[in-house]
Image (cartoon, grey):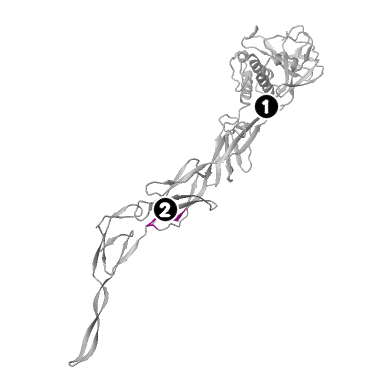
Amino acid sequence: MKHLKRFTALLLTFVIALGIPISANAIQDWYGVSDPLQYTSDLRIGNYTYRAGTSSTVMRLDETNRIAYCIQPDVQIGGNESDWFYETVSSTPAWNALSLNQQTAINLLLLYGYPNQNLPGNKPEQYFATREIIWEIVMGYRDSTHPYTRRDARCYNAFSGHAGFVQAYKELEKKLTTHYLRPSFSGRSAMSAPTIILDYNPSTKKYEKTVTDTNNVLSSFNFSISGVTLSRNGNTLSISTANKITAGTAASSTKPLPSPASTGILIWQSVNNPSGNQNMITGGGAGDPVPAYFKLAIGEGTVQIRKTDATHGGFFAGAVYGIYDSSGTKVDELTTSATDYVKSKPLPLGHYYLQELKAPSGAILDTTKHEFNLTTNGATLSLSVSDQSQTANILITKQGEVLTGASQSDSEFGPLYTPTYGLSALSGAVYDIYANENIVSAGGKQLYTKDQLICTVNSGAKARISPWANIVR
């Protein structure tokens, strides 16, 4: 590009946001080119080839050294041009020939590129890294929508022999391709945001979760939500709250744009030969805000119980248990089965206790509060609780007539003594106790078969029989 001595600007257009113009009149001087960078391989665009070994230069406008970029790489600047002007978008063929997606991508490149942001490398390396990606968008060598995939590497290859250019190019490419990325656990709106399910930590008595951003952009977002502690460490976000939050409660953040984010852009066109000379662009560019949302919910779990017979083994059927939350409110009720566990309905994770409301037939009511925690979403906690079987004592008393004394009376022979007898417990009698039928415990375990000897009892002694049984002497 040949150094031109003077350009007269006729119309100033600021293109802000996505290229919306604000017009004003102004006069600008062309201050030329500087800071050459040599092509390290040929670059052919359209009918023109930029040859390896030749140099291209940084283009600057007016006394403020406004940096300019060509948006028509397949069109040359005429060597006899002396005047240029800013133009309105409606009369800018080169800009209007680009799609809205291309215009948006170029705005982002100006926002994140040189000179608005510092990139690796020296000034010309930063400049040409920015220019080459702009040219890739213009020429269709790179997709103009996220993720902005490069399809043709010719622009990159043209300067890839310069290490600083390579670093600047890759840094700017990363900023472009990650601009619309949100953390992988978030969405673009509160309504469609994914939900993060919190587990319960009994040691802290809080609902917690740690999530990892596989998109590696978490550092650009600062989420907040009332009553919830959010701690960011690299690409991990730790979430903690003692509150029983309402399902669907949303956290939000908007990715901040770098400064300058609203200086707008200017489109430049040749006065004397607008259709035959390349258009240029200057300015700070603009970008869309990138909001991110995720929802929170407390996970749910279940508890299943079975009732064991602590005396004989087996399982009780018919025991009724209430499930109570940490406030003492009954949230469910279960009746035990003799064959399997019985499971509760899904319950919010947290601290609970079980309490027996009705003992099964043949068992003693358990008054213990059995505390437990549901800690993991979707998990089932298994609990075994027990009752003692009811028992009875049998006391066998052997009674018989025994001499208790004598009564005296007179007779013709003198005093007459008549023995008196009474009932009294007799010791030494031995009894065998047998089952009168098959005897099964309340827990379902068969204890004795019909006519089976249960125990032998001496008269005057007690025998404990469990459970209540149909027995014969």
**Which residue does the numbered mark 1 point to in the structure image?**
288
Q: Is residue 70 visible?
A: no
Q: Quadrant of residue 429?
A: bottom left
**Which residue does the numbered mark 2 point to in the structure image?**
319
- Of 206 and 319, nearer the camera is 319
Image vertical order of residue 294 relative to residue 437, above or below: above
Label 1 neighbour load within 10 Å: few <14, some 14-19, many 20+: some
Q: Secondary structure at mark 2?
A: loop
User: Is residue 241 highlighted in magenta?
Assistant: no
Residue 471 position within the rendered picture, expressed as x and y whole percent measured from the top left:
28, 61
**Alpha carbons under labels 1 and 2: distance apart:** 63 Å
Q: Is residue 37 visible?
A: yes
- Of 433 and 231, nearer the camera is 433
The magenta segment is 355-363
| Circle 1: residue type | Asp
Residue 398 position within the rendered picture, expressed as x and y whole percent measured from the top left:
26, 71
Q: Secondary structure at mark 1?
A: loop
